[in-house]
Image (tube, rainbow, N blue to C red):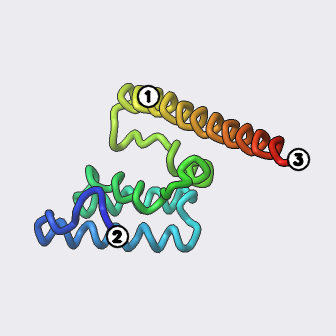
């Protein structure tokens, strides 16, 4: 897995911990358990146990998302929108969600306008064929 957090830059213990977390994450994804609250809690607990809480979100994002991120956000809604009171202060969590909401809406708008532009181009190219 090409990683946002390059594994080769980590010390051996952290490297092994990240590999363990990634393995559990892939196992949960393969079993379609990433929207299950119990599995989500297991991932959080494992990241805490392995002492990689600050790195875990990067690995989760890499595992979940491709170039179809807008569709994938819907698929993993339970995992992504879950408040984690254990890891962040409620005020900070709320602020992050507000910023993320604006960004997600911007992405959605950009995707919709791209689709509309593509439809217009397709319609215009069809009108030239007579």
Q: Nearer the viewer, residue 69 or 49?
A: 69
Query: In this figure, which residue is indicated by the disc labeled 1?
Result: 99
Which residue: 53% across, 31% down?
A: 106
Q: Are marks 3 and 2 in contact (CB under 8 Å)?
A: no
What percent of the width, then of the height, locates residue 100?
Answer: 46, 33
Q: Are marks 1 and 3 in contact (CB under 8 Å)?
A: no
Which residue: 38% across, 25% down?
A: 91
Q: Are marks 1 and 2 in contact (CB under 8 Å)?
A: no
Query: In this figure, which residue is indicated by the disc labeled 2?
Result: 1
Q: Secondary structure at mark 3?
A: loop
The disc label shown at residue 130, or none: 3
Q: Mark 1 against mark 3, which lies toward the viewer?
A: 3
Q: Is residue 90 left or right of residue 128?
A: left
Q: Is residue 89 left or right of residue 101?
A: left
Which residue: 34% across, 37% down?
A: 88
What percent of the width, then of the height, locates residue 15?
Answer: 19, 69
Q: Secondary structure at mark 2?
A: loop
Disc 1 to disc 2, C-alpha distance: 28 Å
The disc label shown at residue 21, or none: none
């Amino acid at each position: 897995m090409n990683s946002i957090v390059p594994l080769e830059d980590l010390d051996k213990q952290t490297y092994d911990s990240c590999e363990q977390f990634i393995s559990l994450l892939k196992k949960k994804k393969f079993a379609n358990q990433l929207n299950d609250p119990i599995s989500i809690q297991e991932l959080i607990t494992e990241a805490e146990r392995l002492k990689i809480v600050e790195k875990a979100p990067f690995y989760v994002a890499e595992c979940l998302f491709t170039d179809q991120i807008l569709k994938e956000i819907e698929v993993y809604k339970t995992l992504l929108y879950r408040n984690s009171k254990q890891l962040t202060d409620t005020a900070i969590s709320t602020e992050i969600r507000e910023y993320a909401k604006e960004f997600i809406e911007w992405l959605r708008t950009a995707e919709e306008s791209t689709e509309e532009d593509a439809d217009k181009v397709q319609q215009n190219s069809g009108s030239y064929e007579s």
